[in-house]
Image: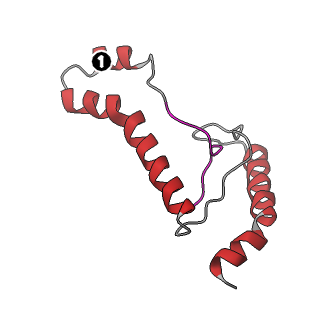
Amino acid sequence: MRRTWPRDFRKTTSDSNALLRLAYKKYPKLLEALDNRPVAYNEQLDYVKKREMEGDLFVIAPKSTLQIKRVEKDPEVIATIYMEGRERALELLDDLKAFLEL
């Protein structure tokens, strides 16, 4: 599994939900899903951590938060983040080989 946030990252509820409530008040199921999003996300992280601890999953995660937008268009920024990910993967290569029993 590959992650774009550090291992200790957890989602929290957002203050922007108040604005979303006004904009999407006709869509209560959407608002419910948005309210539950941090809980569901954090449950998924817990599942991944559990599977990793059990030895069923190998996780490659950045050491710190990546400085990139959700939709990045700057080729230099994209190249920098790519190189950070590549370097991190190389750091973990021996551990990955051991996990894969190569």
Write the residue at 48% across / 27% down. 12
User: Is 48 placed left or right of 17 in the picture?
Assistant: right
Name the amino acid, label 1. Arg
Quadrant location of the C terminus in the rendered image: bottom right
Quadrant location of the N terminus in the rendered image: bottom right
Applied colour scheme = secondary structure
Q: Position of residue 19 (x, y in %)?
A: 37, 15
Q: Nearer the viewer, residue 70 or 84?
A: 84
Q: Nearer the viewer, residue 64 or 78?
A: 64
Q: Would residue 15 be counted in the magenta stretch?
A: no
Main secondary structure of the magenta stretch = loop
Write the residue at 78% across / 73% down. 94
Disc 1 is placed on an element classified as: helix
Q: Which residues are magenta?
A: 1-11
Q: Quadrant of residue 97?
A: bottom right
Residue under pointer 1:
21
